[in-house]
Image: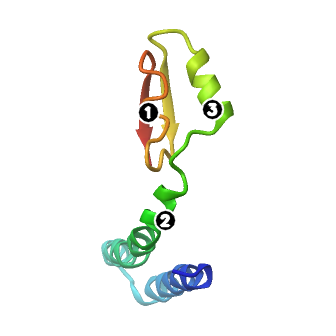
Amino acid sequence: MLDRDKASLVNLGISELQQTRRATHTPLGAEAAAAELERARVHAVYDAIASHFSATRYKPWPVVDNFLRSLPNGSLGADIGCGNSKYMCVNRDVMVLGSD
């Protein structure tokens, strides 16, 4: 998918969310509408770019790799926004928890 197509999907989702907020008068209705927009627009974009994203981010960055290898055994790390988890097994003596 081209970058402009991805941007169009995101912009369309934002526009729909703004319209939904104006049209929805109850908090539960707004929450349900926002959840549906997230499924339809955010998840759709991630699904569309996932294979390309993962294929281009397979190798740990050298500075992060060096940092993880320098940690003492038994250290705990958090990889927030871990994507395809490429850093999880760099140092098997460090417990890395990932969230994306």
**Image quadrant in which you'd find residue 38:** bottom left
Furthest residue to the right?
63
**x and y percentages locating residue 69 in the rendered image:** 57, 19
User: Closer to the camera, 35 or 89?
Assistant: 89
Could you tell which of marks 1 and 3 lies nearer the N-terminus? 3
Q: Secondary structure at mark 1?
A: loop
Mark 1 and 3 residues: CB-CB less than 8 Å, in contact? Answer: no
Q: Which residue is mark 2?
A: 52
Q: Which residue is mark 1?
A: 88
Amino acid at dot 3? Val
| Camera-side mark, 1 or 2 | 2
Could you tell me how far apart the alpha carbons at marks 1 and 2 are, in whole angstroms?
Answer: 20 Å
User: Closer to the camera, 73 or 33?
Assistant: 73
**Image quadrant in which you'd find residue 63:** top right
Horizontal side, residue 44 vs residue 13: left or right: left
Q: Which residue is mark 3?
A: 64
Could you tell which of marks 3 and 2 lies nearer the N-terminus? 2
User: Closer to the camera, 79 or 55?
Assistant: 55
Q: Residue at x 34, y 73 (%)?
A: 39
**Image quadrant in which you'd find residue 11:** bottom right
Above/below status of 51 relative to 62: below
Q: Within 10 angstroms of label 2, few (less than 14), some, or many (20 or more) residues?
A: few
